[in-house]
Structures are given as C-alpha cells and as structure tokens.
Image (tube, grey):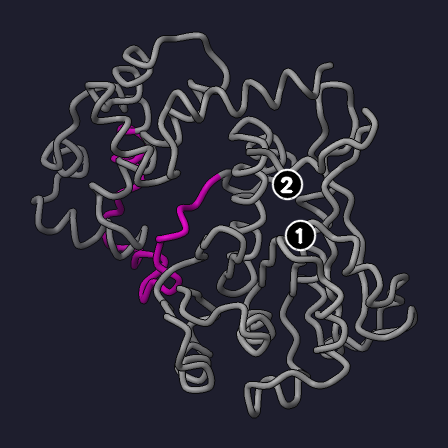
Amino acid sequence: MTAETPPVDGEFRPHRVAVLAMDGLLPFELGIPHRIFGRPADARGRPLYEVVTCSIRPPGPVETAADFAVDVPHGPEALATADTVIVPASYELGPVFEEGRLTPELAAALARVRPGTRFASICVGGYVLAAAGLLDGRPATTHWSHADRFQELFPEVRVDADVLFIDDGDVLTSAGVAAGIDLCLHMVRRDHGTAVANDVARRMVVPPHRDGGQAQYIHRPLPEPQLATTTAARAWALGRLHEPLQLRDLAEREAMSVRTFTRRFREEVGVSPGQWLTAQRVELARQLLESTDLSVDQVARDAGFGTAQSMRQHLQQALGVTPTAYRRTFRAGAAAGAG
C-alpha cells in the first residue's frame, strides 16, 4: 500500500508530512524528514510527498538546542491536513519529560490530527507520542540513554531500547539521530518500494537499509587496529547471496574460528551472521520483485532462499505480505505514477 493521498476528481495529491517543531528541538533531527521525504518523485517527476514544518503556536520563531532559532511558517492548523505527523527530538518539553503529560497547548495541537493519520517520532520525540497515549500497549523505542526514564514514565508502553526503530503500523518510533534517517527511509520503502528508497539513500550518501532490529548501541563499534574484522567476509557474502552460505564459509574468509567470527561479527554489526544474511536476502528479493519479471520461484533461488515457500515465510515475517502481494503493490504503484 503506498502513501499517496487518494486523488480527488482525478487530481494527483502527494502524501502530506507535517513535522512538528517545538522549543529546544535539535536542528539535525528537524532536517531529516525534509531531506528524505523531499526527494522521492513518480515517473512523471511529481513529488510523492509534501513536507511542511509546523509549530504548536502561530507561525513564528521556535528556539532550538543550538545558538539560533528557526522561523516556522505554519501553526498547529497544519496538523489537521497531515497524512503523517513526525515529532523530532526536543529537550525542552517540560511536563512531558518531567511528568509524562502533555501541556494544554500541545494537547490542543495534537487534537487537530485526523483519525487514521500516521505518527512517527525521532529519538525523544517518542515522549510526546507516549504522553498523548498513542503508545499504550504498543512496542516502542527511544534513545538508549533515555529508555529507563521512558519506561518509568510510561509503564503501559513496551519499551525496547535495543533496536534502531519500531514499525507498529500507524505509529513508528526510532532511536537517536541516525536512526531517524533509517526510520524515514523505511517509511519511504514501505510506501513506495525499495527502488525509490534506495535512490533517496544514494543521493544522501547513506546506507540504503539498516534493519530496525539492529542494535542501537554496539559497545565496540570499531575494532581495535590490531584485530581482524568481518568486513571482507560480508562483502564476499553479498556477492554470493544466491549460494547456500554456511557460517564456516564466512569464518574461513577471515581465517577465524566460527566462535570468534560470530562474536566479532555481532560486535561490529549488532546482529548475528544468520540474521544479517536473512536481512540481505530479503532486501535482494524485494529489489527483484519490484524491478524484474522473474517468477517467484526464480527470485527465491536468486535471493538465496532456495524455495518459494522459504522466501514466502521470510517475507511474511519481515514485511507482513507474500511475495506476490508485494510485487502487485509496487507494480501497481509504479503504473499509477506513470499514468
């Protein structure tokens, strides 16, 4: 299902993303939605998204965590026209941080949001969603250093501090800074497919895909200079995803024991070699389903799943759809964009 707003009387309308700017906001996080959602276009060059920045007050300056303010052109009324509302990080949320409750001004602004609107947060922007009751009974994440406080304030939320982002359908949350990029790219991928998201990532010179389940915080993100890494093994595996790779094959590429390789791999990447391989194969299958006319059986073989049934199980688990449904969705979206 794409995020394109249904046309009215045949008129094309891009999906409207409202970014809520609040005092104390972090300028980097504020810019992420504009950089990512401002890029995608259909086959006729029409923007797939319209991004607007709004405040909970009338248009005017909003203070940032830096030594400058930003002049926000829209007030809270923009929230009533949004298809997606994104709440970036802010560190001056007062009662939201201290007591887990919205201010009357913030509550009134959020009350303008239409039912069915998608919400997303970057870093501690998730506090706003939680205080609004949008995360009750749901899984959610935030920056690992704030996770304990987050759980204490909002006991109804199922907090997971070990992931980059969580997609719970109409509400998505992410960890800090770079994880906000991962989340927004994931939303573009979910809305319009891998090819569109990869094009955005390529223009931004960022990795096209980091799985949401990847660890937020890796205790040794860079190996010590004297230690071997698993980089060469990963590059080797990416060129052979269609083959039945075994863990010992990867370990041998780095002249390590399986045990040492597995430990080093998790330290560097944040997930096990098996989880990483499956994620890469799912990503390759998505690309093949979107961009080729290969049969589902052939896509399964080329992506390394072996059988269509195996690929179906993995895509169902990762994406919630079958290969045929995935292909149909994004082929239909591409055809509509070209019309």
Q: Nearer the viewer, mark 1 or mark 2?
A: 1
Verify whether residue 131 appears in magenta.
no
Q: Nearer the viewer, residue 87 or 110?
A: 110
Verify whether residue 232 appears in magenta.
yes
Within 10 angstroms of label 2, few (less than 14), some, or many (20 or more) residues? few
Q: Is residue 263 above or below residue 335?
A: below
Q: Image quadrant for the N terminus?
A: top right
Residue at numbered disc 1: 84
What distance separates the C-alpha of mark 1 from that of mark 2? 22 Å
The residue under the point 52% across, 49% down is: 182
| Residue 221 position in % (x across, y down) | 36, 59
**Drawn side of residue 249 relative to residue 240, left or right:** left
Segment tinted magenta in the rendering: 209-237
Q: Nearer the viewer, residue 40 or 13?
A: 13
> In which image quadrant can residue 24 be found?
bottom right
The residue under the point 25% across, 15% down is: 301
| Residue 283 position in % (x across, y down) | 39, 31
**Drawn side of residue 317 relative to residue 68, left or right:** left
Q: Amino acid at mark 2?
A: Met
**Drawn side of residue 161 relative to residue 233, left or right:** right
> In which image quadrant can residue 103 be found?
bottom right
> Element type at marker 2?
helix
Report the magenta stretch's main SS: loop
The residue under the point 52% across, 65% down is: 176
Q: Nearer the viewer, residue 154 or 146?
A: 154
> Element type at marker 1?
strand
Q: Image quadrant for the C terminus?
A: top right
| Residue 145 position in % (x across, y down) | 44, 77
Residue at numbered disc 2: 204
The label shown at residue 46 is none
The residue under the point 42% across, 77% down is: 147
Q: Is residue 65 above or below residue 267?
A: below
